[in-house]
Image (tube, grey):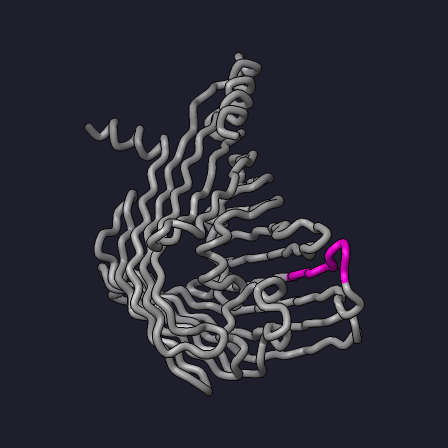
């Protein structure tokens, strides 16, 4: 596969003699250790460690106006026999315009999104094991904010496997002063397998999340401070009975950072957001299973041990509290990222 990818990239370079060409490459490596204690039936106690390596190489034309890159994302759990690994292909085209419009299509890293999706939309477990979006994404990124729309084709239909895809819309814009409007919408669709039983039906999950936020980073002694609150609404349906399950609640978030210390808090109260999770799990519901509870609080206390343009190494304590259980995670994460632009900037410094 890598030989074919290299041949394709070299052909593109050869056919573009009039364009300003540059070899584009990147290396994204992550190591994570997580010890989970005090979970519930959907998030059991466990300790795991994995590495993920995602090298990419390609060609950039006209100062990144056109970018074609390919590579792999290698996920490797750290266990005795080294089994359980996944090697996922990465191959995408990205168009970048000077006015802030971007289009990406193919199999591309989820890190190209402006921000990580909230955990009620995309769980930690899926973030670890599914680092790529398989589809298309368009973005408008301005100094005042951004909007992005993506379609992720999560699973193709086979005789035994069900077709699944998700549509995501995220936005965040400054309104006036520190006030911002933030919003998230996600539609998850689970179709039938090609050969199916009579009790298998098409399923739908729609999540709507309008938020009002305050960015107080310039108004305090902290390096950053952001507060947000809004509604969280889900509509789920099993087309076998065609009944919509409409559940809603309120969510509030806060994030603050001072030097190397960061605090993140998310609090939800309302009805069970994912009533179909016990039947379909993450095939349909992509968010954290903790939102199966009517009350949930997550507090992340994060220390940035090393934090620069290349490395972010953190040690975290994550506290979970629901109306039924409490839990604590101890986590160490190290992400190393380097690409041709960062490499060139470092060389020019010297």
Say which residue appears at 26% left-offset and 32% top-offset.
Answer: 346
- Note whether 58 is above or below 132 in the view shown: above
* Foreground of the two, 254 or 70: 70
- Note whether 75 is above or below 18 in the view shown: below
Task: Answer left or right for 97 relative to 47.
Answer: right
* Foreground of the two, 160 or 170: 160
Say which residue appears at 19% left-offset and 28% top-offset.
Answer: 350
Query: Total of numbered circles in the picture?
Result: 0
* Identity of the residue furthest to the bottom in this view: 323
Is residue 159 visible from the viewing direction of this image? yes
* Identity of the residue furthest to the left in this view: 350
The location of residue 25, given as percent across then percent down, is: 41, 31
* Identity of the residue furthest to the front in this view: 81
The location of residue 323, given as percent across then percent down, is: 46, 87
Say which residue appears at 32% left-offset and 51% top-offset.
Answer: 31
Task: Answer left or right for 224 relative to 164.
Answer: left
* Foreground of the two, 306 or 216: 306
Q: Which residues are magenta?
A: 187-196
The location of residue 349, given as percent across then percent down, is: 22, 30
Is residue 61 visible from the viewing direction of this image? no
* Foreground of the two, 199 or 142: 199
Can residue 191 be found in the magenta stretch? Answer: yes
The location of residue 129, given as percent across then percent down, is: 47, 54
- Note whether 203 is above or below 327 in the view shown: above
User: What secondary structure is the stretch in magenta mostly built from?
Assistant: loop
């Amino acid at each position: 596969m890598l030989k074919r990818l290299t041949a394709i990239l070299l052909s593109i370079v050869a056919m573009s003699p009039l364009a300003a060409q540059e070899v584009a490459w990147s290396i994204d490596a992550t190591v994570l250790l997580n010890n989970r204690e005090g979970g519930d039936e959907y998030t059991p106690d466990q300790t795991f460690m994995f590495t993920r390596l995602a090298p990419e190489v390609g060609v950039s034309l006209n100062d990144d106006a056109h970018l074609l890159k390919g590579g792999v994302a290698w996920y490797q759990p750290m266990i005795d026999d080294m089994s359980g690994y996944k090697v996922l292909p990465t191959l995408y085209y990205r168009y970048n315009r000077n006015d802030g419009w971007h289009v990406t299509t193919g199999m591309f890293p989820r890190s190209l999104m402006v921000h990580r999706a909230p955990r009620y939309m995309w769980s930690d477990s899926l973030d670890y094991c599914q680092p790529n979006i398989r589809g298309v994404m368009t973005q408008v990124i301005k100094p005042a904010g951004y909007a992005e729309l993506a379609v992720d084709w999560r699973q193709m239909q086979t005789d035994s496997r069900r077709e699944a895809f998700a549509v995501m819309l995220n936005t965040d814009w400054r309104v006036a002063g520190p006030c911002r409007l933030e919003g998230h919408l996600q539609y998850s669709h689970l179709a039938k397998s090609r050969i199916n039983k009579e009790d298998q039906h098409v399923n739908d999950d729609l999540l709507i999340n309008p938020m009002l936020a305050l960015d107080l980073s310039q108004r305090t002694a902290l390096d950053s401070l952001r507060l947000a609150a809004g509604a969280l609404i889900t509509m789920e349906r099993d087309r076998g009975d065609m009944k919509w399950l409409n559940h809603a609640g309120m969510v509030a978030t806060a994030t603050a950072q001072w030097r190397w210390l960061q605090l993140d808090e998310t609090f939800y109260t309302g009805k069970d957001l994912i009533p179909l999770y016990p039947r379909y799990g993450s095939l349909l519901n992509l968010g954290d299973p903790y939102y199966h509870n009517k009350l949930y609080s997550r507090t992340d206390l994060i220390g940035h041990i090393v934090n620069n343009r290349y490395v972010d190494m953190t040690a975290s304590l994550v506290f979970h509290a629901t109306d039924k259980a409490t839990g604590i995670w101890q986590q160490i994460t190290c992400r190393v990222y380097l690409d041709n632009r960062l490499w060139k900037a470092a060389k020019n410094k010297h």
